[in-house]
Image (spheres, rainbow, N blue to C red):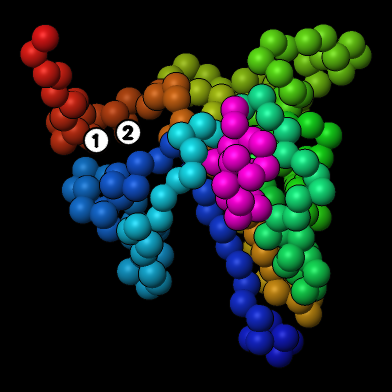
Amino acid sequence: MNSDRVKRPNILYIFSDQHAARVMGCAGDTAADTPNLDRLANEGTRFTRAYCPSPVCLPARMSMLTGKMPYEQSCWTNDDILDSAIPTWLHGLGATGYQPALVGRMHSLGPDQMRGYVQRPIGDHSPTWPGVHRRSLGVLNNTNSPLVDSITKSGVGQSSYQVMDQDILAQSLSFLKNYADSDRAEPFCLSVSFMLPHAPYVANQEDFDAVKDAVQPPSQPQA
């Protein structure tokens, strides 16, 4: 193994969408079956006072990339485009010799779909054009591969997001295996960005039965 791998760390960044921090075994949720997250937490450090800069998806994700607050980069809604002149932490890593890769969701609108990443074998699930109202893309209509593929593969009791996440996992494992089998000098930086547990909340029968008696719906105050 090349000594440079020891000098600089490998970076594996795992991101789940709309995942409440309390819904993990390591956070005290006895109904949550999260052995891999629990192991990472037990062998590492948990940040229990990390706060999201925005309740809206795109502004929060763009802040996560740049380290800036939404108002500093004019990203207020899911329809805003981050200025490509604003550097991200991936640009910083690239300048030091890393070749950052992203598998899965980024939710970045506009033509810049890399934001400092140099590899992105699986892109966003849905089209990334600006604006709320979808417009015709002419010959490019219906060519968004992740969306089309996952809908085609999904069956009864399974959402397209679940299929998308299976593809993200498979591609990520392939990336790590290829790296382990190689003699690359530089350490890797891999971001794995899943779609779930984002709505719609569809579970197969086996998973539902495992938690249906352990999870209580939130109580509703009397009107």
Residue 11: % across, % down: 61, 67
* Left or right for 84, reference 123: right
Q: Is residue 101 visible?
A: no
Magenta part of the protein: which range?
58-77
* Overall secondary structure of the magenta section: helix
In the picture as drawn, the residue positioned furthest to the front comes out as 72
* Left or right for 203, reference 90: left
Q: Is residue 204 above or below residue 223?
A: below
Q: Is residue 48 above or below residue 148?
A: below
The amino acid on which the numbered mark 2 sits, given as a three-letter code, is Asp
* Residue at 73%, 67% in the rendered image: 93
Front-most of 15 and 50? 50
Residue 150: % across, % down: 63, 26
SS class, disc 1: helix
Q: Is residue 64 above or below residue 91?
A: above
* Left or right for 218, reference 141: left
The quadrant in which residue 88 appears is bottom right
The answer to whether mark 1 and mark 2 are in CB contact below 8 A is yes
Residue 23: % across, % down: 30, 44
In the picture as drawn, the residue positioned furthest to the right comes out as 139
The residue at which mark 2 appears reads as 207
- Tell whether position 215 is magenta: no
The residue at which mark 1 appears reads as 210
Circle 1 residues within 10 Å: few <14, some 14–19, many ≥20: few
Q: Mark on residue 138?
A: none
The amino acid on which the numbered mark 1 sits, given as a three-letter code, is Ala
Spatial separation of the CA atoms under disc 1 and disc 2: 5 Å
The quadrant in which residue 3 appears is bottom right
- Tell whether position 72 is magenta: yes
Residue 95: % across, % down: 80, 69
Front-most of 149 and 200? 200
Front-most of 167 and 57? 57
